[in-house]
Amino acid sequence: MSDVMIPPWVLPESPETIRWIDDATQSFPPAFGRGMTQRSSMADPRWGLKRRYRGLRSDQKAAILQCLNESRGQFNKILVTSHAPLRGSFATSEILSNGTFANGTTGWAAYSGVSSLTVADRVLRDMLTQNNGTTVAAFVNSSAITTLTQYAPYVVRAMILGGKGFATGSQILVGSTSGASDIASQQFTSQGLVSVAFVPNSGGSFFILIAGGTSASGRLAGDYFSCSYVSISRCALADLGPNSLLYSSDLTNAAWSPLGLLSTAYGTTGAFGTATASTIVENSSNSVHNKSQQIARTSAIADWQAHAIVSRGSGTRNVRLLIDDGAGSSGQVDVDLSNGSVLGSAIAGFASNLRVAVQSLGGGFYYIGLVVNLTASSSAIRLFVYLLSGSTSVYTGNGTSSLIVECANVNLSSCFTRPVTTTSAATAGSAPSGGAMYVKGLPASTDGLLLPNDWMETANQLKQATAPLNSDAAGLGYLQFRPSLGDSPADDDPVIINQPFGRFIYSGQQKELENQFGIYGDIEMDLEEVYS
C-alpha cells in the first residue's frame, strides 16, 4: 500500500467538520445496579473529518481526482492536513518558494543533464533523456538554500507519484553542494510522502536532491517519475533519551576512571530528590582532578552530544565537561556552579561546531550540555568531568572539595537530549506511548511554542496539543497531545508543525464528484483516520 495526498493548496469550503470516532470503547448497561462494569476502553478515539470542495477546476480538480483514483476505495491512505492557524509561536514558514509547482519549474533544475523537467497540473515530471550508465533522473533546487537557522532541526518532505520505470527505489538527499548527501539522506521503495530530518551546521548553502532511483541500470530514455509536493520547514525531534554511557549516575563503578581524586561515593541526594547521584572528592595532588569514561564509536564524522547534572558538594569548585575522540579533537565547556554562568568553551584539533547549554534545575544543580562535531580519526569517544579551581584544571587540591554528579550522558545527536540514567547497559532510549512525549531541538527558553488545539504530526499521525509546549535553555520540551500514539516515533523522528498530515481513508461507500458544466467539480468527503 502507498499513500496519496490531497495537496494543501486545494482548500476545502468552510466550515470543516472535525469529530472523534470512538470505536474502541464498549458500554455494558449494568443488569444488577451499581458496582458492575459499565464500559471497556482500549484506545483513544480517532479523528474524523468531513469536508466539502466546491467549484474545483483545472489543477484543483485534477488533484482531487488523482487522489480519489489512487486511493483505490479504502485500500490506500489519503494524506490530509489541517488548515487551522497555529496559535503558538513555533516558526511555521515554508522555506521553498515553489514547493507546490504553482510556478512551473521555477526554482528547480534537472540534475546532471540526463533528464528534463515539465510541470502540468502542479505535478512535476522528471524524464530521462538518455542513460549514461551512472545517473538516474533527479531534480534539485536550482539555487542554494541560505535561509536556514544554524543548529535548528528541519524536515524535508516530498510526495512521489511514481512513473514509468521508477515505481520503486527513490531517494531524498540533503547536501552542502548540489547532489551531495553529506547532511542527510533517505531511500524509499514505493510512492508516497517521504520525510528526512536534518540539523544544519551552518546557516546556508544547502541543496536537496530528489531522485527517481538509486541505480541507472535498466533505465531507458523516456522513463520518468513525478512529484506533487516538496516542503522544507522547521520541526522538532523526538527525544527518546539515548545514553551510550554505563552507570551514568554511579561514578564509583569501574566503567569510570579517576585522576587526582581522593574518593567517590554513590548515594548522594541529587537533582531528582533521590539518593541516586555520586560525589567525587579531589585529592591533594597538583594535577587534574576528574572522572572519565570511554565508549566505542563508528569512525564517521558526526555530531556528538554530552551532558551531565552537576552541583557543588563541598567547597567552591566549578566544573568542566569535555568530550574528545582520544586523537586530539575535543570540545569543552567550563561552568561556574555558583550561578550557572559559562566561564568559557573551546574546541581542539579538528573538532568544530561547538554549542553549549546550561539550565538551572534548582537547589544548586545545573544541566550542563555540549554538542560538537568530531572527525572520523578515531574509534572512541571519551567524556571527562573535571573539578576546576576557578577556570583552572591543574591545581593543588585540598582533599575536601567535591562535586555532585548524576545522569552523565553521551550519544550521537545534533541536539541536546534529556537526562537518562543507565546502569550495566547503555540505552537506545524509551519509545513514548500515550498522550505525551519528550522533544528536542526547540527554540531555547521559549514559552507557548504550541498552545492547546494546535496541530502537529508525529510517527505519521495527526495530533492536537492539549497543553502549552515550553522549552528550556537546552531546547528540550514535553509535548502533550491527543489522541494517544498509535505507533511510537523513533529517536530523532521529526515532529512536524508546518502542514502536518494525518492518514485517512474515505469512509463513504461511494466517491462522487459532481461535474458542473463539464469544467467545475463539487465533492464531499467523509474521512476516518487510520494508523496502518
Image (cartoon, helix red, strand yellow):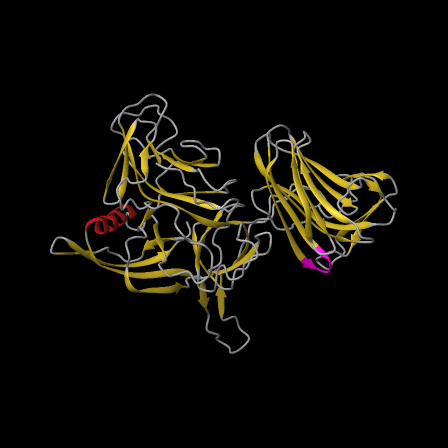
Residue 459 visible here? no
Indicate the position of residue 205 as horizontal and vertical percent values. Answer: 44, 37
For this orientation, the residue located farthest to the bottom is 33
Q: Is residue 388 above or below residue 268?
A: above
The question of residue 260 being in magenta is answered with no
Q: Is residue 203 above or below residue 296?
A: below
Tell me the residue at 66%/40% (across/down): 346
Indicate the position of residue 307 as horizontal and vertical percent values. Answer: 66, 46
> Is 523 situated left or right of 470 in this image?
left
The answer to which image quadrant residue 364 occupies is bottom right
Tell me the residue at 50%/40% (across/down): 202
Residue 97 visible here? yes
**Quadrant location of the N terminus in the rendered image:** top left
* Near-viewer residue (241 or 304): 304
Highlighted range, magenta: 361-365
> Is 302 situated left or right of 229 in this image?
right
> Is 247 situated left or right of 505 in this image?
right
For this orientation, the residue located farthest to the left is 517
Tell me the residue at 38%/33% (across/down): 169
Indicate the position of residue 295 as horizontal and vertical percent values. Answer: 68, 35
Indicate the position of residue 32 as horizontal and vertical percent values. Answer: 51, 77
The answer to which image quadrant residue 414 occupies is top right
* Near-viewer residue (32 or 223): 223
For this orientation, the residue located farthest to the top is 133
Most frequent secondary structure within the magenta stretch? strand
